[in-house]
Amino acid sequence: MEKELVEYIVKSLVDFPDEVELNVVEGEKSTILELKVSSQDIGKVIGRQGRIAKALRTILSAAATRSGKHASLEILD
């Protein structure tokens, strides 16, 4: 659920949605989503002063909390 939500939002933001990769690393108590986008789109995903990245993490955290889990987002370059 969380993966599809983040993937949908990120693909809507970037210029090259075909290059969006989202890997899920499952742990016992938490899930880590590793996001990789085109080098030209990295600024659009992070946003000014990290505002978009923070908003994505907030949405992810809220969605994960509903299912009783903890999730975090890592943006890889």
Image (tube, rainbow, N blue to C red):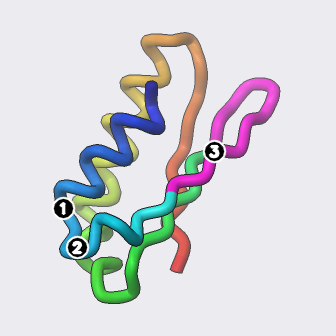
CB atoms of marks 1 and 2 within 8 Å: yes
Residue 24 numbered mark, or none = 3
Side of 32 where 52 appears, left or right: left
Q: Quadrant of residue 27?
A: top right
Q: Is residue 69 magenta?
A: no
Provide the secondary structure element on which disc 2 rests: helix
Residue 13 numbered mark, or none = 1
Residue depicted at 41% across the width and 64% down the height: 20
Q: Which residue is mark 2?
A: 44
The image position of residue 73, as x and y in percent, is 51, 51
Identify whether 37 is placed above or below 52.
below
Residue depicted at 59% across the width and 20% down the height: 69
Query: Which span is picked out in magenta?
Result: 22-32
Lower position in the chain sequence, tag 1 or tag 3: 1
Residue 20 makes an appearance in the image: yes
Lower position in the chain sequence, tag 1 or tag 2: 1
Residue depicted at 45% across the width and 25% down the height: 1
The image position of residue 67, as x and y in percent, is 51, 12
Residue 48 makes an appearance in the image: no
Q: CA distance from mark 1 to mark 3?
A: 20 Å
Q: Main secondary structure of the magenta part?
A: strand
Q: Quadrant of residue 49?
A: bottom left
Which amino acid, by three-letter code, is at mark 3?
Val
Provide the secondary structure element on which disc 3 rests: strand
Q: CA distance from mark 1 to mark 2?
A: 7 Å
- Residue neighbourhood size for the residue with mark 2, other residues' Cα within 10 Å, grouped as few (<14), some (14–19), many (≥20): some
Lower position in the chain sequence, tag 2 or tag 3: 3
